[in-house]
Image (tube, rainbow, N blue to C red):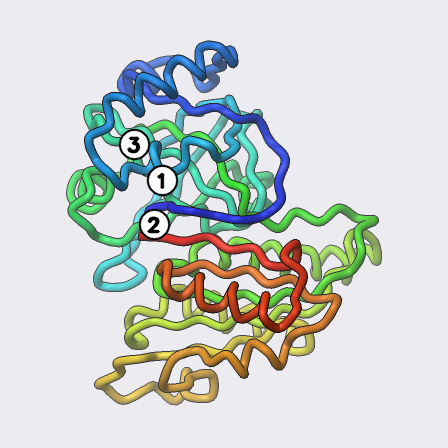
Amino acid sequence: MERSAMACAAVGVPGLFRGSVGAICTQAALLRLTPSALRHLTLSSIMKSKRKTDHLERTADVVRREVVSAAKVCGTAYESPSVKRLRLLVADKDFSFKAGQWVDFFIPGVSVVGGFSICSSPRLLEQERMIDLAVKYTNHPPALWIHNQCTLDSEVAVRVGGEFFFDPQPADTSRNLVLIAGGVGINPLLSILRHSADLHRAQADKGSGYAMGTVKLFYSAKNTSELLFKKNILDLVNEFPEKIACSLHVTKQTTQISAELKPYITEGRITEKEIRDHISKETLFYICGPPPMTDFFSKQLENSHVPKEHICFEKWW
């Protein structure tokens, strides 16, 4: 999933790295750069960029961590005919992320740096040192490499960035979430959904931690084969029937919808009224999808007097 514009409150360390990708991957798991070096590399990388929609150029002003970590591909699978999932082992203990963030994706021998959202939960990284990415096939060099050349044990490097995340602390006010996804915009929202489920489990097991509210996912794709992570989503809905719900939308379905999916499927786009029905002072809205979709829903929510600080959006191209 290629990153684009985003809006949300966040804290972090600014900076951008782009240089010899091969050098990154052959060094130790940790690579730390001084702020001055980061500024120099930011300037030189943007000057060299010839691609108007280059991930590094689009996100030059977005906060990033300074740590670039080596990663190894330890699993691959196809989530749809056009979307390939990677599981990466990141041994570096200093590598961490918040649910909803993305990684700069450095590939040896590929000069263009990718930008892909993490779709797994922070808990998977904490427990197993693994993260998942799901990448749609395009002619962009990093996506081409993932689909055509990436194999088990391929080595890459990653660095976390992004201001689009959900990271409540135990004492924070309980919030409900409405997640609005279009296409591969599901990736960061799935990470947030999985993190929400982990918070519910912690509450149930220990009776402590953040008091997670309800989560409603609205997810639209062309057809059911392009609805990614269907089983994962429905498993969470069934595990937390009082806490997690989903409404799956298809806009160009031509085949019969399975009996298992049918109760959750609506044919047609996500509507303004569906979203408006979930507005409350306790609810945060996270939107990720094509720019027209994110623009439409963020504007509609603002028109419905939802505070701007309760609307978090990210666009993909």
Which residue is under mark 3? 113
Q: N-terminal of the two: label 2 or label 1?
A: 2
The part of the image, by quadrant, that contains residue 281 is bottom right
Name the residue at the front extreme: 303
- The answer to the question of whether label 3 and label 2 lie on touching residues, with beta carbons closer than 8 A, is no
Q: Is residue 119 left or right of residue 276?
A: left
User: In this rendering, is residue 103 above or below 253?
Assistant: above
Q: Residue at x 27, y 18 (%)?
A: 22
Res 115 label: 1
Inter-mark Cα distance, 3 to 1: 7 Å
Which residue is under mark 2? 1
User: In this rendering, is residue 2 above or below 279?
Assistant: above
Type of amino acid under label 3: Val
User: In this rendering, is residue 288 above or below 31?
Assistant: below
- Neighbor class of circle 3 (other Cα within 10 Å; few <14, some 14-19, many 20+) is many
Type of amino acid under label 2: Met
Type of amino acid under label 1: Gly
- Neighbor class of circle 1 (other Cα within 10 Å; few <14, some 14-19, many 20+) is many
Inter-mark Cα distance, 2 to 1: 7 Å
Inter-mark Cα distance, 3 to 2: 12 Å
The part of the image, by quadrant, that contains residue 111 is top left
The part of the image, by quadrant, that contains residue 224 is bottom left
Q: Residue at x 27, y 41 (%)?
A: 53
Q: Residue at x 22, y 63 (%)?
A: 81
